Image (cartoon, coloured by chain):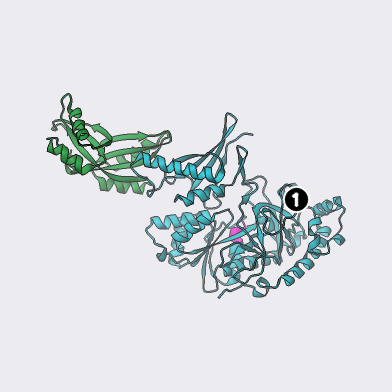
Chain colours: A green, B cyan
């Protein structure tokens, strides 16, 4: 039920991001989602890709430091209050959201996708699906 | 069973060593007086003649030589033998100013190579060994010195010189090199590269390393020993005194035996020039008593260390010097606090960081800033920003405890700090004073 996210260490300086996207572009890796967390001197680029294994291999070859973590892909109903409803469920169940970010779903997806990093992933997955919220699988993301 | 290259010298009684030093010093002072006008003038200024130096007890009367003298006398001013007897020069990198050019007669080269051979045997080397010399060859003394020592011991010598890491590793593996000679930072880099290739210590044929030409910490020794699966030995020397081999570590790996049959060591107070007793930290001063072509008397090394005459478990009787805590000219004064790069290295290695770091000193609005740049490693990296910030703070705290001042710690991309194949560039001082 979870999705694999690759987190990459970046220096916060001109050209750092470009160096990473160049590696991905040259290896024809398709990003499904991307977000950046930063401090004044370093940052973490978090990406969801179409091919996790290949991405890790090329990043390692090019000397990037990265880690793989597990996150939840949630389909947010595309109506006013859609995200609010999801957060309400997590709040009621006491699941803390560490961070989250949204990205474009495919044309055939009825809703927006959001990535959630939560403290208790199994619990979050079960309470959300129990209340009719759809989760997106790794395979579905790769196939987008 | 400890082995020695020249047992009768290395394990001689203290009385014997004193006798050698007394005789050789008297002879050397006369040699310098007669052949080096530059130093003779210095002696005359102090009202000294060779007759005033009757034994090592009189050594303290002699004037010092410093790097400034070497620059002033450049190139031939301190040459002690006629040109036709000199067969070679070696030279320093000149990174801290004008190059130092040192001269050698064939006998000078011979004694220098003997000193290096003692170091190799002390590290467990014999004619059964394959010794790879990855110090630079050429003007730098590292390559030629260890190369000569390795020949004397009878090792199969691989003169790779520095650089071309892939080829270094190929030779180590293909020829089963058992001893590696290079700078400690290059040893660490070779270790890192072999680890990346998936080699474990038991797949690396090396058993010992002789690493010198720059300051390195006990923690760095541990880390090199672990990645390469070897015993790492320190070796000390200066071009001014011949090159590596002035002092070397034995199996005890606790301090370096100074080759006292060739060099008399003193530790002085760097401010007053006063000679300090054993066990007290100060600036190391050497008098070369056997070299003829470049016979430096009371040369101030600017290396800070401690001497010890305590009995060594290896059986050698020559005095030991501690690892130099740093050179007086490596020492940074930041906001009035004395900082040695080796202290920063100790903190990093203790907290599990690699020995690849750079220290950047600057002055912003008349206040000194200290920025320690450390490379991120896969082991340290996590998706959790807070955890990384926590580690950064741990480093800042560790540095504050060690140095007594607040440093900024910057995490930089892996491999972004340039690897050195010779001496590592640890400090970038941007202050304009």
Magenta: main secondary structure: helix
**Chain identifier of the residue bearing label 1 in the image:** B
Q: Does the magenta stretch include residue B142?
A: yes
- The answer to whether one can see residue B144 in this image is yes
> Tag 1, which secondary structure?
loop
> Left or right: B252 with respect to B377?
right
Q: Residue at x 87, y 53 (%)?
A: B47
Q: Residue at x 67, y 49 (%)?
A: B99
Q: Is residue B393 magenta?
A: no
Looking at the picture, does residue B165 appear above or below residue A28?
below
The magenta segment: B140-144
A90, B321: nearer the viewer: A90
> Left or right: A54 with respect to B188?
left
Looking at the picture, does residue B426 appear above or below residue B253?
above
- Crowding at dot 1, Cα within 10 Å, few <14 / some 14-19 / many 20+, comes out as some
Q: Residue at x 86, y 60 (%)?
A: B52
Looking at the picture, does residue B116 appear above or below residue B419?
below
Kindly give the residue lying farthest to the top in the view shown.
A80
């Amino acid at each position: 039920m979870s999705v694999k996210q690759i987190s990459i260490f970046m220096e916060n300086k001109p050209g750092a991001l470009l160096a990473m996207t160049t590696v991905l572009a040259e290896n024809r890796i398709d990003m499904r989602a991307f977000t950046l967390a930063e401090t004044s001197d370093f940052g973490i680029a978090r990406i969801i890709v179409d091919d996790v294994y290949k991405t890790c291999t090329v990043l390692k070859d090019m000397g990037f430091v990265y880690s793989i973590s597990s996150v939840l892909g949630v389909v947010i109903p595309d109506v006013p209050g859609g995200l609010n409803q999801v957060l309400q469920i997590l709040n009621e169940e006491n699941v803390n959201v560490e961070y989250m970010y949204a990205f474009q779903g495919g044309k055939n997806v009825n809703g927006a996708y959001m990535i959630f990093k939560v403290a208790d992933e199994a619990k979050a997955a079960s309470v959300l699906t129990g209340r009719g919220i759809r989760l997106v699988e790794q395979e579905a993301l790769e196939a987008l | 069973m400890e082995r020695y290259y020249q047992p009768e010298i290395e394990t001689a009684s203290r009385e014997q060593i004193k006798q050698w030093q007394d005789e050789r010093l008297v002879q050397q002072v006369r040699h310098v007086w007669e052949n080096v006008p530059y130093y003779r003038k210095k002696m005359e200024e102090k009202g000294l003649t060779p007759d005033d130096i009757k034994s090592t007890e009189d050594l303290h009367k002699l004037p010092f030589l410093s790097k400034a003298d070497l620059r002033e006398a450049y190139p031939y001013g301190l040459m002690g033998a006629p040109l036709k007897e000199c067969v070679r020069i070696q030279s320093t990198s000149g990174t801290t100013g004008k190059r130092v050019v040192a001269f050698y007669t064939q006998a000078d080269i011979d004694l220098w190579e003997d000193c290096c051979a003692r170091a190799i045997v002390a590290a467990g080397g014999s004619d059964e060994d394959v010794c790879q010399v990855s110090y630079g060859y050429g003007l730098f003394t590292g390559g030629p010195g260890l190369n000569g020592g390795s020949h004397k011991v009878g090792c199969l010598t691989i003169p790779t010189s520095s650089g071309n890491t892939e080829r270094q590793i190929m030779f180590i593996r293909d020829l089963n090199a058992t001893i590696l000679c290079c700078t400690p930072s290059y040893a660490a880099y070779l270790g890192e590269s072999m680890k990346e290739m998936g080699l474990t210590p038991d797949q690396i044929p090396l058993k010992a390393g002789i690493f010198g030409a720059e300051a390195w910490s006990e923690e760095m020794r541990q880390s090199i020993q672990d990645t390469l699966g070897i015993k790492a030995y320190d070796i000390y020397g200066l071009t001014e005194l011949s090159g590596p081999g002035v002092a070397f570590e034995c199996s005890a790996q606790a301090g370096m035996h100074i080759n006292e049959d060739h060099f008399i060591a003193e530790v002085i107070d760097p401010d007053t020039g006063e000679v300090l007793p054993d066990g007290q930290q100060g600036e190391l001063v050497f008098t070369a008593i056997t070299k003829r072509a470049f016979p430096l008397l009371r040369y101030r090394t600017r290396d800070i260390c401690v001497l010890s005459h305590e009995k060594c478990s290896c059986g050698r009787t020559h005095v030991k010097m501690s690892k130099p805590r740093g050179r007086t000219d490596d020492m940074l004064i930041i906001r009035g606090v004395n900082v040695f790069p080796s202290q920063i290295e100790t903190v990093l290695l203790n907290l599990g960081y690699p020995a690849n770091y750079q220290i950047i000193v600057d002055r912003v609005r008349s206040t000194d800033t200290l920025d320690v740049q450390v490379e991120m490693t896969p082991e340290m990296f996590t998706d959790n920003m807070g955890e990384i910030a926590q580690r950064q703070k741990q480093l800042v705290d560790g540095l504050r405890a060690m140095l007594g001042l607040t440093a900024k710690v910057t995490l930089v991309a892996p491999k972004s700090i340039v690897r050195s194949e010779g001496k590592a560039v640890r400090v970038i001082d941007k202050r304009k004073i």
